[in-house]
Image: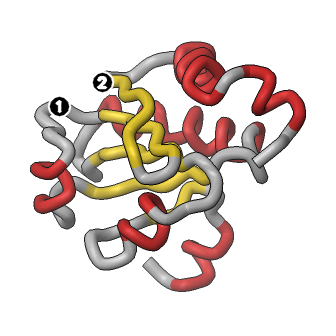
Amino acid sequence: MNKQAVSNERVIPVNESDFNSTVLQSKVPVFVDFYADWCGPCNMIAPTIEALSEEYAGKVRFVKINVDNNQQLAMKYDIMSIPTSMLFENGTVKDSLIGAYPASAYKQRIDHALGSEHLKTGKQ
């Protein structure tokens, strides 16, 4: 993937070398999408995750981790099935969801985990 393609995406690819700085040390909550290129359901929800990244821009950072290329992270977070999404805040997992769901399910989990007041006001 070329640098221009990465910079135009709102859902940032992350790997084992930049996971700590991008996810665990983030000042804003981070939604992590664990996926694989060959995974049909993962490809199905990709546009949904992209749309959510636009809706929550400035409030939540969205990243994706290819489990085939980052097996240590997949093992560390017990990823047994994909897609698996996790919401990190202050370096810890606040919520996780295994499987492919409509946007409303992800929004409900994000809003619940962060507190809807937190998102409405945009406070970070």
In-front residue for pair 40/7: 7
Question: Which residue is tagged 1?
Answer: 81
Q: Quadrant of the N terminus?
A: bottom left
Q: Is residue 46 above or below residue 99?
A: below
Residue visible at 65% across and 46% down? 60
Question: Residue 39 sits in which quadrant?
Answer: top left
Q: Residue at x 66, y 36 (%)?
A: 52
Going 58% across and 33% down the picture, which residue do you hit? 48
* Three-letter amino acid code of the residue under disc 1: Ser
Q: Is residue 32 above or below residue 111?
A: below
Whichever of labels 1 and 2 marks the residue nearer the N terminus, that label is: 1
- Determine whether the residue tagged by mark 2 lies in a helix, strand or loop: strand
Residue 98 marker:
2
Horizontal arrangement in the rendering, residue 112 relative to residue 40 (left or right): right
User: What distance separates the C-alpha of mark 1 from that of mark 2?
Assistant: 7 Å
Query: Residue placed farthest to the bottom in the image?
Result: 3
Q: Quadrant of residue 26?
A: bottom right
Give percent across and percent down for residue 6.
56, 73
The extreme right residue here reads: 121
* Residue 33 percent across, percent down from the top left: 40, 44
Residue 107 in the image: x percent, y percent?
62, 22
Question: In the rendered structure, which amino acid carries the disc numbered 2?
Answer: Ile
Pointer 2: residues within 10 angstroms few (<14), some, or many (20+)? some
- Is label 1 in contact with label 2 (beta carbons under 8 Å)? yes
Mark 1 lies on a secondary structure that is loop
